[in-house]
Amino acid sequence: MNGIAPPLALLAELTHRCPLQCPYCSNPLALDRARDELETEIWLRVLSEAAALGCLQVHFSGGEPAARRDLEALVKQAADCGLYTNLITSGVLLDEARLARLAEAGLEHVQLSFQDSHAANADRIAGFAGHRKKIEIAGKIRAAGLPLTANFVVHRQNLANTGSMIALGVELGAERIEIAHVQYYGWALKNRTALIPTRDDLARATAVVEQARTRFNGAVVIDYVVPDYYAKRPKACMGGWGRRFLNISPSGKVLPCHAAESIAGLVFENVRDRPLAAIWESSEAFQRFRGIAWMPEPCRSCERAEIDWGGCRCQAFALTGDAANTDPACALSPDHAMIADIAAAESAHPPGGFIYRRHSS
Amino acid sequence: MSERDISDESRPRLAPHRRLKFDAVRRGWTIQAPERVFVLDEIAHAIVSRCDGEKTIGQIVDELCTAFDAPREVVAGDVRKLLQDFVGKGVIAP
């Protein structure tokens, strides 16, 4: 394998179609069209290639993956190949019969997204009246015998409800709850002033999460993602570029992370053209920021170089114009002052209106 | 002490929907859990593979002392530390 360790997980973005219009959507600004989506046969091949390459898990995501009618067939193929299968969904296109078919096909876990714990605000944020349907579908997921993660993306317009989000997750029978602050790339970067919380509001939410974690002690796992703009050290984005994860876009581009297309100048290979293993091991985009040889100072000689892997390439590009720079989220970055200034200035103003993410095929 | 703390009487087992699985590519054992994978080293596998909901911690420690010819206090400390950590991560039910 050329000494390159195999990936742990594949994020399969089946489609960019989605009824929701969340202003922090993690999809790229330029959405793939329905007619450019990979055909079923190609996904079936890619899933078996991913398992042979060493992937242990596949996360079916989107857009809304249930918009694909072949979702059951893809889940079955993944399960047959020995992959642990996870569905990341808004839930609004699911029903009891479809959940039963997915469970039968071998689905092992569902991550259901919520935009808030309060229905009216959740529907406003999503640009879609789906909250009540999500509550209903959570019950059906549990009734189908599937474990549930409740995912809440938090930002200044719902952060005060963190405690009631955790309570809702517990009430719905989630065994895992994700409280994930928006990170600012793509759509969220466009909407940053409407989303970024103040440092004090963040601290209050963090305290709520920590109390809940102590209370549940693993009976309910609470994963918490803090916003980079208030961090001292960058997150180890994707566990390091080209180390653990690969992402396939609806049209078949193989990406080191879901936001990588935001980096100008990188060329991504397509599963239509080459085997997945060859792309993982030798494509220029994966090699570009793999390991530590590409790093500038202060990363290169940093004792944390192989802990945080220089942080996030997309953020470095978005904020400094060069993806090879140290992530400005790091206090050691020469650009770190900028990020703290942006956070302080924008969060002090009243939030602007949302620019909703809309898909037109 | 809460009911989620590991004690001598605990009969730990894998939490529901977790799978202990051999990975042929890495030639090693893994635990598959919702949205996470734990790659186990030899010691961790020796401990976790004995968590069947039947054996007590004491019995697991006895077995490992024999299998690895190691002093009991060292093994007992390692077992409790690893299992309590996995309880906190939702992997093991105490």
Image (tube, coloured by chain):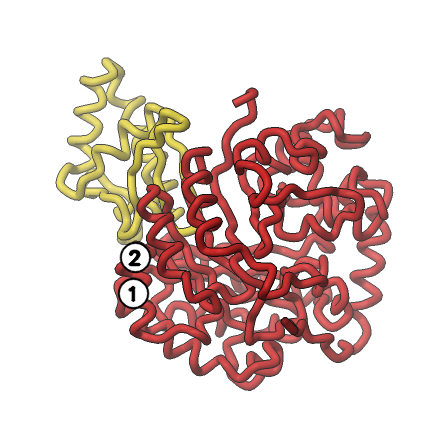
Report the disc number at residue A105. 2
Left or right of residue A55, residue A280 in this image: right
Q: Residue at x 44, y 71 (%)?
A: A91
Residue B89 seen in the figure: yes
Question: Residue A306's image quarter?
Answer: top right
Left or right of residue A195, residue B7 in this image: left
Chain corresponding to yellow in the figure: B
Is disc 2 placed on a helix, strand or loop? helix
Q: Residue at x 71, y 62 (%)?
A: A30
Q: Quadrant of the C terminus of chain A?
A: bottom right
Q: From what the image shows, is residue A126 above or below residue B92?
A: below
Q: Label 1 belongs to which residue?
A: A101
Q: Residue furthest left?
A: B54
Question: Where residue A97 sits in the image (x, y, percent)?
Answer: 29, 73
Question: Residue A300's image quarter?
Answer: top right
Structural distance between the alpha carbons of marks 2 and 1: 6 Å
Q: Residue at x 71, y 37 (%)?
A: A310
Chain corresponding to red in the figure: A
Question: Where residue A336 sits in the image (x, y, percent)?
Answer: 82, 47
Circle 1 chain: A
